[in-house]
Amino acid sequence: MDAFLTSRPVADILGGLTNGVIYSLVALSLVLIWRSTRILNFAQGAMAMLAAYVGFAILAPTTNYWISMGVAVVAGIVLGGLTERTIVRALYGKPEINPVVAMVGFLLVLESVAAAIWSTVSRSLPTPFSIVDWQLRGRPVAMSPFALYEVVTAVVVMVVIAVVFQFTRVGLQLRAAALNPEVSRLLGVRVHRMLTVGWMLASGVGAITAVLVASNYFTGLTPTTMDGVFAFGFIAAAIGGLDSPVGALVSGVALGIAFQFVGDYLNSNAIILVALGLLIVSLMVRPNGVFTRRAQRRV
Amino acid sequence: MIGVSGLSVSYGAVQALRDVSFSAAPGKITTVLGANGAGKTTLLRTISGLVRPRAGEVTLEGDRITGTHAEDIVRRGVGHVPEGRGVIAEFTVEENLRLGSLIVRRSRAERQAAFERLYGQFPVLGERRRQSAGTLSGGERQMLAMARALVAEPRVLLLDEPSLGLAPLVTAELMSTISQLCATTGLTVILVEQNAKSALRIADQAVVLYIGRVVADDRAEVVAADERLRQYYLGLVE
Ligand SMILES: Nc1ncnc2c1ncn2[C@@H]1O[C@H](COP(=O)(O)OP(=O)(O)OP(=O)(O)O)[C@@H](O)[C@H]1O
Ligand SMILES: [Mg+2]
């Protein structure tokens, strides 16, 4: 049993899971926004990065990790709401290219603003748990207390989002507003408010994701911390289906594990090629995503 | 009580309603008839706030509601069952009802009791409460759309072609449900129909639209008996 737990494939699965839940969270945020507003939020990673800076750079690094995390989440929620009310609101009903250009532009603006205020020098974040892998009879298991905290946090976030959407009044309204805005208005749903709430939720999730990513000892927090993670989360969302939260979660974890195996058995430089290959194949075979049910598709 | 006066609506160059006036009394069914494109749907959408008129106004119990948002008009007691029914197919039957009951303040128990009353009235919905609305038949969807509007306890109910796509027997059942509701609760009903024959049978008052104008506004029996209206505007030729 011990030999199994410390074996190479299990190490790859555990390591892949830890990375994969992060891609899942990014993909989940993208799906939340896509479902309600039909906009691909390319600035998502940058918004999350900014929220992490607010929590961990404005607030002195000496303060409590949990307070900083809380501040980052609140900053993310506020930034998401403001973004929807200002930039995004001007984009509804415009040709599809407009939101793409606007959100990529916003991404660049946010990254330069962060660089101007905090410089591009990497800043390491405190971690609430040890990042040293657990040992079993002298051999490392590919899981540290911090990695476990990452996975648990991701699962808790996903469960909370699912419960909000499935079982609460606001969740019912969020889903209705996305599925049929006009009928929702006739039943009293304040659809505009729901779009704002959707962006707030997605950006709150983004902020948690950015803090987890930036806690990584090797990268730390920089203005471009989220770029790579965002690209993989985006691929996960595209493969899973932009309309499918479950697809986002499953394909994020699957990608994380696949990349770990590729990196371990092939070459870590092959990861990006494999990612693009998987994306192209899945878009060719199931253009609307592997997890989108045919009956749910619009037109 | 709904009052419509001097209502004009345009979509760009297309004028859909021209100076439309009539009123709908509580406890009575007012049917709005007319051919395709006459402006019936536009009229209901303007009453419920989805469309802004160019001129004229709508009043609810004497208060002007024109210019109020649709989300707020429904809170004032105007329920609208839209053309094509608008049940949310991805939601279960009960989720559709929960959506309908959002605007009413009640405890969980009171809400469930309201659902149970509706399930008593529409037993098939009770049987399918956990089923997704997309799996319902056309007639069942119509029942659900009505039930979803009724769960908010409206004072005014706007129905846009409820009989569309239903078998004659189902239509007859639906019409009798509507007239019972109206008689027992004092609801103001505005019933838009293509199916003039069955609408005139249950209606108290009838308004006939022709290319956006009111060409007749009279008691239903009078409209039903008018040969000229029957032939030219209602297509009821024997
Ligand atoms: N959104 C819109 N944009 C432009 N024109 C519209 C729009 N909605 C309706 N119209 C036009 O307004 C006129 C009235 O349409 P409306 O849907 O009110 O008719 P209707 O009486 O409900 O017809 P039907 O019996 O076919 O449902 C039609 O000429 C229609 O083409
Ligand atoms: Mg119509």
Image (tube, rainbow, N blue to C red):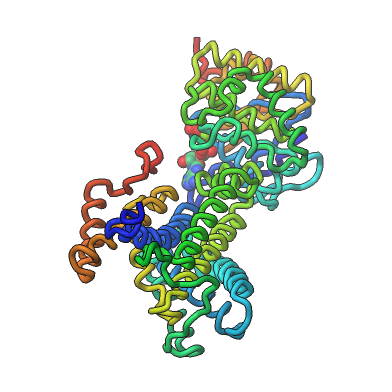
Residue extending furthest toward the right? B62
Q: Residue at x 54, y 42 (%)?
A: B16
Q: Position of residue A147 (x, y in %)?
A: 45, 65
Q: Is residue A255 visible?
A: no
Q: In which quarter of the image is the N terminus of chain B?
A: top right
Q: Position of residue A294 (x, y in %)?
A: 35, 38
Q: Where is residue B25 in the image (x, y as percent from the top left)?
A: 77, 29
Q: Which residue is drawn at 52% across and 28% down?
A: B131
Please name whichever residue, A14 or A234, is drawn nearer the observer in this view of the structure: A14
Picture layout, residue A125 above or below residue B37:
below
Residue A231: name its quadrant: bottom left
Please name whichever residue, A211 or A142, is drawn nearer the observer in this view of the structure: A142
Judge from the rendering whether residue A75 lies leftward or rightward of residue A226; answer left or right: right
Please name whichever residue, B112 or A68, is drawn nearer the observer in this view of the structure: A68
Q: Can residue B178 be seen in this view?
A: yes
Please name whichever residue, B132 or A219, is drawn nearer the observer in this view of the structure: A219
Q: How many labels does the image show?
A: 0
Q: Which residue is drawn at 43% across and 66% down?
A: A134
Q: Where is residue A155 in the image (x, y as percent from the top left)?
A: 50, 55
Picture layout, residue A125 above or below residue B185:
below
Residue extending furthest toward the left? A266
